[in-house]
Structure formats: C-alpha cells, structure tokens
Image (cartoon, rainbow, N blue to C red):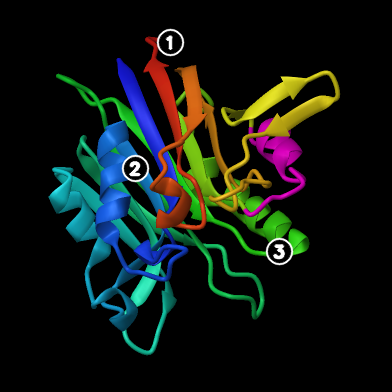
Amino acid sequence: MKLRFLTYNIHRAIGLDRRFKPERIEEIIRDHNPDIVLLQEVDEGVPRSREQAMAREIATHLDYPYYAMGHNVSLRKGYYGNATLSRFPIVRERNIDLTIDNKKRRGCQHTTINIGDTTEQHLEVFNLHLGLAALERQKQASRLMRSSEFSALDANTPCIVGGDFNDWLSRLRALFVEAMGLHCATDHETQKGYTSMKTFPSFSPRGGLDRIYYRGNLKLVSVKKCRHQVAKVASDHLPVIADFILTKS
C-alpha cells in the first residue's frame, strides 16, 4: 500500500503578506493530494482567522472524511494547535502535553489511524510542534519518548513522527534516531554527515525546521518540499511531502 504524508506549519493561514487566505493552504494541499496531513499552528474560533474551525473547514473543503484537532494554546477567544486530516478512519486521538515549565504551551497530537482495507492495520501518527529554545526542545523530545503513547508501541508498528521541530542545528537527531529507533525521511547523507531539507523561511529557506521521522514496516519512496510559487507567501514555512510503501513485515 502506498501512503503519502504532508506536514505543514500553516501559520494560521496568515501569509507573509499578512493576509488571511486559507484557500492558498488548501490549494497547496490539494495539489499534492496526501493521504494524511499534519498541520501546525491551526486556529479554532480565533478572531484573527474569522473564528473559523480551521481544521474542520480545510477537511471539508478537501474531502478528508476524518480529522482531529488538538488544542495547545488557549487564547482570549479560541484556541490554536495541531490538526491531523486523514482519508482513513482515526480510531484514537490524544494530545500529549509537551509544555516545559513556564514556556509557551506546546503539544504533540497522537492519532491512531486504521489503514487496513479489510482488517485492522493501525498506523501511529505523532504530529508535534516543539519550542524555540534548545534545552526546551530536548526536554520535550524526551517527554514524548517516555510518554505512554509512544513507549508502549512495538518497534515494528508503522509509526510517523512529523511536524515543526524548530531544530535549526539538528541537535535532536540522535535522540530520535538512536534512542527512539526512528529513521529521518528529511535528512540527506553527505560526506560530512547529514543535512536537513530546508523549509524556513518559505521565501528563502535556510533552516530545516519541518521534518518527518518514521519506523516500522514503512519504506520511504521519496520526499520533497513544496516548490509552488504560492507556497512562498502562503505561510512562513514550506510543506514537506513524503511517500511511503507499507510493507507486510
């Protein structure tokens, strides 16, 4: 089975031109036609985004029958956080609190998705948005690793961890790869080690903030960042698109 994933920090659908235009985000997602979408910085009921339930609106407009919204930040009016859209049934959803001390509230949305045609085959998806400080991110990644949602998984269970890692210098790579047993789809091996796919800022990317890790019976086929002209202004991040094949073992 082929599966396409897209992860995208949509910046509340407010572009670099300061215009709220969710239709640009929808156009980008539609053109890549992913099976599962991981979104960060998604508003719900917030005045700046016309009080839209943005996850529901995008899912409806793009014909995703299943979606889950995880609230990380409570605003004076409304919330924002991470959202996962899926063409397959979401059978379980949890929001893992990754907030450290008095830092801005952060979270990782965990969804269990049934991708089986005739029998149940579960895919575990972790959609996260980490903090801005290096030590904060390290603590957040460790908390995710120790969480019951992740630590209880069998190593062979298909699993995706994606989102906005804010990890400019790839300091978390060893933890995700060596400690958590994941492979990084968005890193490329070079003679000097590994280099990350650059996605931020969208108009002239210099940092590899948006990443996809995976493990279990998933085989990476291809990975790319969006090169659509509209993506340079629709958000301050570029989306990442990864294609996998779900193998039998």
Q: Is residue 169 magenta?
A: yes
Res. 35 visible in picture: no
Name the N-terminal-most of marks 2 and 3: 2
Residue 53 percent location from the top left of the image? 22, 68
Q: Which circle, 3 or 1, is nearer the viewer?
A: 3
Q: CA distance from mark 2 to mark 3?
A: 26 Å
Give amino acid for label 3: Glu
Displayed quadrant of residue 47 = bottom left
Q: Residue furthest top?
A: 248
Res. 147 visible in picture: yes
Give amino acid for label 2: Val
> Do residues under tags 3 and 1 come within 8 Å of each other at their CB atoms?
no
Question: What residue is shown with label 3?
Answer: 136
Q: Residues within 10 Å of mark 1 (few under 14, many from 20)?
A: few
Q: Residue furthest right?
A: 192
Residue at 68 percent across and 50 percent down: it is 167
Q: Say left or right for 28 vs 136.
A: left
Question: What residue is shown with label 1?
Answer: 249
Which element is circle 3 on?
helix
> Do residues under tags 1 and 2 come within 8 Å of each other at their CB atoms?
no
Q: Which mark is residue 37?
A: 2
Q: Which residues are magenta?
A: 166-180
